[in-house]
Amino acid sequence: MSKDQLVYIVFGCIISLALVFDLGFLSKKNTIISVAQALKQTFLWVLLALGFFIFVWIEEGQKIGLEFLSGYLMEWSLSIDNIFVFILIFDAFKVKEKNYPRVLLIGILAAVIFRITFITLGVALVAKFSWLLYIFGIFLLYTGYQMFTSDNEESFDPHESKVYKFLKKILPIGSTDGDGRFVIRDHNKKPVYTSLFVVVVLLAAIDIVFALDSIPAVMGISNSSLVIYTSNIFAVLGLRSLFFLLRGAVNKFEYLQQGIAIVLIFIGVKMLGEHYINMWMDKNAQVILSLLVILFCIMGSILYSNFVKKQKSSKHNKD
């Protein structure tokens, strides 16, 4: 058995056990998750990821270990943007809080399946057409620029999304949540899809959109399939607990979007200039540099957001 095979087996066991625990104890119908519970669950997912990071370091070496940590932090920070859109979707369709855990779980599991599919396709294409990395680099530069310059106040209306309009065209969509069900029967005994079904589809669709940024970004950090798969899945599966933890505070991180944008631009530049960067910096140093840039930009943007918020609050109190 190779080292990669062993790591994949351990990864599969960790994820399976975590999901069994999640499904068995944390995803019961009509359960409301408190901030304290969300904090414990978030801590558990982060602890599992850090434990896996240590295991990868031991089995695969420092370089792959740090690449996993960098990729995980990159995906985790991008997840906060996902959460902001998730909140808008739940509010737009007036989802009851008791239905949040189950709807999020199903939407996120669907997102994992799509991510695995896209990663497999992306890795195969890059292996055959290496010049695609330059396309990904240009795409990350463009996305980072758009994210940095966009107005944080721009709102996303789920009812105006192409996915919702498409669903309305092909399926009978009802206006109720079906008391927690995804499909109900009308007076003619015909199936009607509830608003909860729509929300699950929208959650998965939105994650696909975010995956178009996150997967090229982690490919810019590492060319290891092991790192790309595991960092993505760890981050996505931790989305649900992060949602409950941050749903009341996500708007406080006013400049987090700019921090993420700088990271995407950095990775885009790194992908485009890889040939020249390799001439004066070895791979280990590049991995450490990427990790430091990610940590600095994400933590810096959060701290700056809090600083600006306090300054505005202090000014408002004086006035």
Image (tube, rainbow, N blue to C red):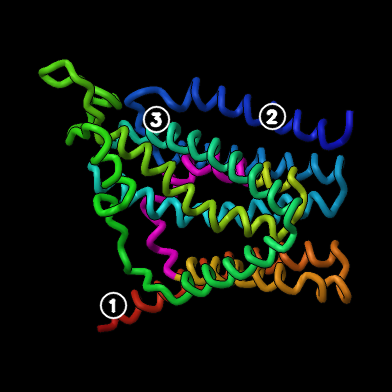
**Amino acid carrying mark 1 in the image:** Asn
Q: Position of residue 276 (x, y in %)?
A: 82, 76
Kind of element beneath mark 3: helix
Instruction: Return the residue at label 3.
Output: 102
Give yes or no for residue 240 being in the magenta stretch: yes
Q: Is residue 252 left or right of residue 262?
A: left
Residue numbers of the magenta segment: 232-254
Residue positioned most to the front: 128
Q: Residues within 10 Å of mark 2 (few under 14, many from 20)?
A: few
Residue nearer the viewer, 147 or 272? 272
| Circle number at residue 2 | none
Q: Which residue is mark 1?
A: 317
Q: Earlier in the sequence, mark 3 or mark 1?
A: 3
What residue is pinned by disc 2? 12
Amino acid beneath label 3: Arg
Between 314 and 105, the residue placed more toward the observer is 105
In the rendered image, the vertical position of residue 72 relative to residue 100, given as above or below: below
Locate residue 234 relative to residue 304 in the image: left or right.
Answer: right
| Residue 272 image point, x, y percent | 71, 72
Instruction: Please indicate, yes or no, whether residue 297 appears anywhere in the rendered image.
Output: no
Q: Main secondary structure of the magenta part?
A: helix
Check disc 1: other Cα within 10 Å, few if <14, some if 14-19, many if 20+.
few
Q: Which secondary structure, mark 2?
A: helix
Label 1 near label 3: C-beta < 8 Å?
no
